[in-house]
Amino acid sequence: MERGHMMDTVGQYLMENPEEALRLDVKTDPGAVRSQALLCGIGPGARVLDGGCGSGKTTAVLCEMVQPGGSAVGVDFAEDRVRFAKKTYGDTPGIEFALMDLRSPLNALGSFDFVWIRFVLEYYLEGAREMVENVSRVLKPGGRICLLDLDYNCLNHYPIEPAMESVIHALVRRMMEKYNFDPYAGRKLYTHLYDLGFDDIEVHLVPHHLIYGELKESDDFNWFKKLEMASSKARDVFDGYPGGYETFRKDFRQVFNHPRRFTYSPLIIVTGRKPS
């Protein structure tokens, strides 16, 4: 998710590691979350479910935006991330966190004016539609669901040598085949809501990764942590690269850290109203 999620053939979240809550916390930009939430219509007095809350940072921003009178509930299926969220953001008035799987019944949480699902469906190449349908059950009639995810995730870098680009694409394909990762989740969001019968569907397209010039420390940490995690699950993908993984890592760092580099991923935001 932005966030803690899913699942290879034996049920392991692709990015699972002891530092995942920290990675999610570092990479989350509160200003970007506020702008995206405004596009979705989230405001004072609303009760919001943050599905796949990860570190809890996004839940805290959403809770801030629904004041006065609103509240936010963050849900994640990883005990360590829920623990991190409670410790870091649990003292915020109007906020709570729960250890739950978004594929399981959520009725115990009550009903919500908004359901927010950001950077979650990219970990469900199979099962995304069913998850959206499940979380929509706790949405009040007339409430809005907010789906936010990336398209061409991790694939757009320039300039980049063909051998390096080939490895990146092979790595993403492996993540799709073995870990249920979907680099094209964003383009599917509108159709999910259309097929589920939502009304007043709105679509917004904004940049997410937009990296040029001097590299921010948060981007450096996030991208190389992702490379480290992916490589640990598919080290053989680097065998065809001259010098193997260690050389690839060095070469990619040289390209990625150069201010001439341009990297981007489009973020697609889709909202819809649950029929009354």
Image: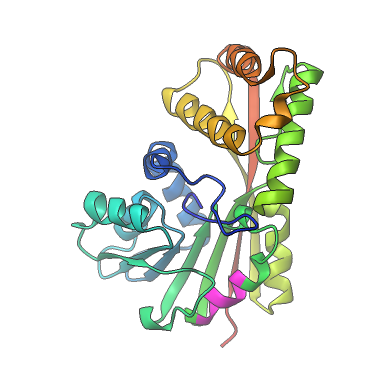
Asked if the magenta segment contains residue 155, the reply would be no
Residue under the image location 41 percent in, 53 percent down: 54
Residue 98 horizontal side relative to residue 68, left or right = right
- Provide residue 111's location: percent of width, then percent of height: 41, 81
Q: Which residues are magenta?
A: 131-137
As rendered, which of 217 and 13 lies closer to the eye?
13
Residue under the image location 43 percent in, 28 percent down: 218
Q: Quadrant of residue 159?
A: top right
Vertical placement of residue 128 versus 54, above or below = below
From the image, give the main secondary structure of the stretch colored magenta: helix
Q: Quadrant of residue 120?
A: bottom right
- Provide residue 95's location: percent of width, then percent of height: 27, 63
Residue 172 horizontal side relative to residue 145, left or right = right
- Provide residue 121's location: percent of width, then percent of height: 60, 58
Asked if the magenta segment contains residue 134, the reply would be yes
The C terminus sits in image quarter: bottom right
As rendered, which of 39 and 157 lies closer to the eye?
157
> Is residue 174 among the parts visible in the rendering?
yes
Residue under the image location 29 percent in, 50 percent down: 84
- Provide residue 116's location: percent of width, then percent of height: 48, 63
> Is residue 182 among the parts visible in the rendering?
no
Residue 80 horizontal side relative to residue 103, left or right = left
**Residue that sits furthest to the bottom in the current view:** 276
Colour convention of the picture? rainbow
Vertical placement of residue 104 versus 250, above or below = below
As rendered, which of 59 and 271 lies closer to the eye?
59
Vertical placement of residue 153 versus 134, above or below = above
